[in-house]
Amino acid sequence: MQRGFVVIDDTAMHRRLLEEAGRFAANSDAELILFSWITPEQFEEQLDALESVEETERTNYREFTAQEAAVRFGRRFAEETLGTLVDDVTYDVVGEVTEKDELGGTVLEVAEKHGCDHAFITGQKRSPTGKALFGDVTQRVILNFDGFVTTAME
Protein backbone atom coordinates (compact mmCIF):
# COMPACT_ATOMS: atom_id res chain seq x y z
CA MET A 1 0.00 0.00 0.00
CA GLN A 2 1.22 3.47 -0.83
CA ARG A 3 1.71 5.84 2.06
CA GLY A 4 1.79 9.62 1.67
CA PHE A 5 3.35 11.99 4.17
CA VAL A 6 1.78 15.45 4.46
CA VAL A 7 3.36 18.27 6.47
CA ILE A 8 0.51 20.45 7.74
CA ASP A 9 0.26 23.89 9.27
CA ASP A 10 -2.65 26.29 9.62
CA THR A 11 -2.33 28.18 6.33
CA ALA A 12 -4.37 28.30 3.12
CA MET A 13 -1.45 26.77 1.19
CA HIS A 14 -1.32 23.79 3.57
CA ARG A 15 -5.08 23.34 3.22
CA ARG A 16 -4.76 23.20 -0.57
CA LEU A 17 -1.87 20.77 -0.26
CA LEU A 18 -3.84 18.47 2.07
CA GLU A 19 -6.82 18.58 -0.28
CA GLU A 20 -4.53 17.49 -3.13
CA ALA A 21 -3.00 14.74 -1.00
CA GLY A 22 -6.51 13.63 -0.03
CA ARG A 23 -7.51 13.32 -3.69
CA PHE A 24 -4.30 11.37 -4.34
CA ALA A 25 -5.07 9.00 -1.45
CA ALA A 26 -8.73 8.53 -2.39
CA ASN A 27 -7.87 7.75 -6.03
CA SER A 28 -4.94 5.43 -5.34
CA ASP A 29 -6.11 3.70 -2.16
CA ALA A 30 -3.14 5.20 -0.31
CA GLU A 31 -2.90 5.95 3.39
CA LEU A 32 -1.82 9.39 4.60
CA ILE A 33 0.39 10.25 7.54
CA LEU A 34 -0.33 13.85 8.53
CA PHE A 35 2.61 15.48 10.25
CA SER A 36 1.78 18.28 12.67
CA TRP A 37 4.50 20.00 14.64
CA ILE A 38 4.88 22.59 17.35
CA THR A 39 7.87 24.34 18.88
CA PRO A 40 8.31 24.35 22.66
CA GLU A 41 7.84 28.14 22.59
CA GLN A 42 4.53 27.87 20.73
CA PHE A 43 3.30 25.35 23.28
CA GLU A 44 4.23 27.68 26.15
CA GLU A 45 2.27 30.47 24.42
CA GLN A 46 -0.76 28.17 24.16
CA LEU A 47 -0.54 27.33 27.85
CA ASP A 48 -0.29 31.02 28.73
CA ALA A 49 -3.36 31.75 26.61
CA LEU A 50 -5.34 28.93 28.25
CA GLU A 51 -4.26 30.13 31.66
CA SER A 52 -5.45 33.68 31.00
CA VAL A 53 -8.78 32.64 29.48
CA GLU A 54 -9.73 30.02 32.01
CA GLU A 55 -8.06 31.67 34.99
CA THR A 56 -6.58 28.38 36.11
CA GLU A 57 -3.10 27.39 37.00
CA ARG A 58 -0.68 25.88 34.55
CA THR A 59 -0.47 22.74 36.70
CA ASN A 60 -3.99 21.79 35.55
CA TYR A 61 -2.51 21.13 32.10
CA ARG A 62 0.30 18.90 33.34
CA GLU A 63 -0.96 15.87 31.41
CA PHE A 64 -1.57 17.88 28.24
CA THR A 65 1.72 17.67 26.35
CA ALA A 66 3.03 19.63 23.40
CA GLN A 67 2.96 16.47 21.30
CA GLU A 68 -0.72 15.94 22.13
CA ALA A 69 -1.41 19.56 21.17
CA ALA A 70 0.17 18.94 17.77
CA VAL A 71 -1.91 15.78 17.24
CA ARG A 72 -5.15 17.51 18.27
CA PHE A 73 -4.45 20.33 15.84
CA GLY A 74 -3.71 17.82 13.08
CA ARG A 75 -6.95 15.92 13.61
CA ARG A 76 -9.04 19.09 13.63
CA PHE A 77 -7.20 20.42 10.56
CA ALA A 78 -7.79 17.14 8.68
CA GLU A 79 -11.49 16.99 9.50
CA GLU A 80 -12.00 20.60 8.41
CA THR A 81 -9.85 20.36 5.29
CA LEU A 82 -10.68 16.95 3.87
CA GLY A 83 -14.41 17.63 4.03
CA THR A 84 -16.27 15.07 1.93
CA LEU A 85 -13.05 13.15 1.25
CA VAL A 86 -12.65 12.31 4.94
CA ASP A 87 -14.70 9.11 4.53
CA ASP A 88 -12.63 8.00 1.51
CA VAL A 89 -9.19 8.66 3.02
CA THR A 90 -7.39 6.60 5.63
CA TYR A 91 -5.07 8.80 7.65
CA ASP A 92 -3.22 9.01 10.91
CA VAL A 93 -1.86 12.12 12.61
CA VAL A 94 1.66 12.24 14.01
CA GLY A 95 2.59 15.13 16.26
CA GLU A 96 6.12 16.17 17.10
CA VAL A 97 7.80 18.84 19.17
CA THR A 98 10.71 20.33 17.27
CA GLU A 99 12.59 23.56 16.85
CA LYS A 100 12.00 25.24 13.50
CA ASP A 101 15.64 24.88 12.45
CA GLU A 102 15.42 21.10 13.04
CA LEU A 103 12.17 20.63 11.12
CA GLY A 104 13.73 19.26 7.91
CA GLY A 105 15.51 16.46 9.74
CA THR A 106 12.44 15.67 11.83
CA VAL A 107 10.24 15.47 8.71
CA LEU A 108 12.64 13.03 7.06
CA GLU A 109 12.96 10.87 10.19
CA VAL A 110 9.21 10.59 10.77
CA ALA A 111 8.46 9.91 7.09
CA GLU A 112 11.05 7.12 7.05
CA LYS A 113 9.80 5.68 10.34
CA HIS A 114 6.29 5.38 8.87
CA GLY A 115 7.45 3.92 5.56
CA CYS A 116 6.15 6.78 3.43
CA ASP A 117 6.87 6.77 -0.29
CA HIS A 118 5.37 10.13 -1.25
CA ALA A 119 5.84 13.46 0.55
CA PHE A 120 3.63 16.52 0.24
CA ILE A 121 5.20 19.75 1.49
CA THR A 122 4.91 23.50 0.96
CA GLY A 123 7.82 25.79 0.30
CA GLN A 124 8.80 29.41 0.08
CA LYS A 125 10.48 31.10 -2.83
CA ARG A 126 13.96 32.06 -1.67
CA SER A 127 17.13 33.04 -3.38
CA PRO A 128 20.06 30.61 -3.23
CA THR A 129 21.68 32.96 -0.70
CA GLY A 130 18.53 32.91 1.46
CA LYS A 131 18.50 29.11 1.39
CA ALA A 132 22.17 29.00 2.37
CA LEU A 133 21.70 31.47 5.23
CA PHE A 134 18.34 30.37 6.61
CA GLY A 135 18.08 26.78 5.41
CA ASP A 136 15.11 25.41 3.57
CA VAL A 137 13.00 22.51 4.79
CA THR A 138 11.50 21.89 1.35
CA GLN A 139 14.90 21.76 -0.31
CA ARG A 140 16.18 19.32 2.31
CA VAL A 141 13.19 17.04 1.82
CA ILE A 142 13.45 17.15 -1.98
CA LEU A 143 17.15 16.28 -1.86
CA ASN A 144 16.98 13.61 0.84
CA PHE A 145 13.54 11.95 0.70
CA ASP A 146 13.58 8.48 -0.82
CA GLY A 147 10.39 8.75 -2.87
CA PHE A 148 8.19 11.17 -4.76
CA VAL A 149 7.82 14.73 -3.48
CA THR A 150 4.93 17.03 -4.33
CA THR A 151 5.48 20.67 -3.42
CA ALA A 152 3.27 23.71 -3.37
CA MET A 153 5.05 27.05 -3.36
CA GLU A 154 3.77 30.00 -1.37
Image (cartoon, grey):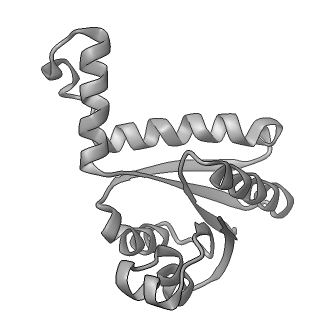
What is the x, y in percent for residue 142?
Answer: 56, 84
What is the x, y in percent for residue 133?
Answer: 36, 84
The quadrant of the image that shows the C terminus is: bottom right
Residue 103 horizontal side relative to residue 65, left or right: right
Total marks in image: 0
Q: Is 57 located above or below residue 48 in the figure?
A: above
What is the x, y in percent for residue 106?
Answer: 37, 69
Snapshot quadrant of residue 99? bottom left
Q: Which residue is drawn at 81% across and 54% down?
A: 26
Q: Which residue is drawn at 41% across and 43% down?
A: 70
Q: Which residue is drawn at 60% across and 67% down?
A: 121
Residue 82 horizontal side relative to residue 41, left or right: right
Q: Which residue is drawn at 44% across and 75% down?
A: 108
Residue 142 horizontal side relative to residue 36, left or right: right
The quadrant of the image that shows the N terminus is: bottom right
Residue 76 horizontal side relative to residue 99, left or right: right
Q: Residue furthest top?
A: 55
Snapshot quadrant of residue 66? top left
Of residues 61 and 99, the one nearer the viewer is 99
Of residues 32 and 124, the one nearer the viewer is 124
Q: Is 139 located above or below residue 6 in the figure?
A: below
